[in-house]
Image (cartoon, rainbow, N blue to C red):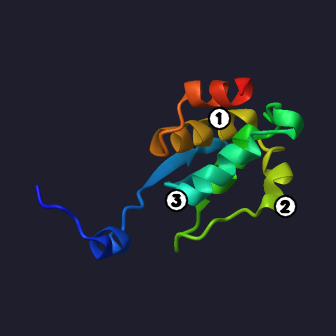
């Protein structure tokens, strides 16, 4: 296997997407991998004041960080996470689990974020 150059690394399209069927919403949604910076922002959002865990709307926060339109643009802003969190728990769980899998966010990661 050849050693990659900086240009090769920076120019490769390493984003993956996955369609998720959400019957509660009447169709499919597209989940994408997060960039390293986006994953860091998501993990930082799980930390509350004084190092406490912020698990409020964790499903909606991860879904909002991964849910993209047909052009690959994020569909929800941080301001809309509360509204997204009001959607069906069953639907959010389905999309959340796909986002976890695609972005290598394990249940253990979520628990560790809560502990730390």
Q: Is 108 drawn above or below residue 60 in the view shown?
A: above
> Badge 3 local density, few (<14 within 10 Å), some, or many (20+)?
some
* Rendered location of residue 36, percent (x, y): 52, 56
**CA distance separating discs 1 and 3:** 22 Å
Dot 1: few (<14), some (14–19), or many (≥20) neighbours within 10 Å? Answer: some
Who comes first in sequence, dot 1 or dot 3? 3
Q: Which of the labelled discs sits on residue 79, or is there none?
A: 2
Residue placed under numbered mark 3 in the picture: 35
Which of 48/68 is in front? Answer: 48
Quick check: can you spot residue 66? no
**Residue at 32%, 67% in the rendered image:** 9
SS at mark 3 in the image: loop
| Coordinates of residue 44 in the picture (x, y in percent) | 71, 46
Residue 97 x %, y %: 56, 36
Examine the rendered structure and indicate whether residue 114 appears above or below residue 18. Answer: above
What secondary structure is marked by label 2? helix
């Amino acid at each position: 296997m050849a050693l990659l150059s900086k240009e090769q690394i920076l120019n490769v399209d390493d984003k993956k997407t996955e369609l998720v069927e959400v019957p509660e919403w009447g169709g499919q949604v597209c989940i994408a991998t997060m960039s390293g910076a986006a994953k860091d922002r998501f993990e930082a959002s799980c930390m509350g004041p004084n190092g406490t865990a912020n698990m409020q709307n964790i499903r909606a926060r991860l879904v909002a960080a991964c849910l993209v339109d047909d052009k690959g643009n994020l569909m929800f802003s941080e301001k809309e996470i509360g509204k997204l969190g009001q959607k069906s728990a069953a639907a959010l769980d389905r999309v959340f689990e796909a986002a976890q899998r695609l972005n290598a966010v394990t249940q253990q990661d979520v628990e560790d974020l809560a502990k730390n």
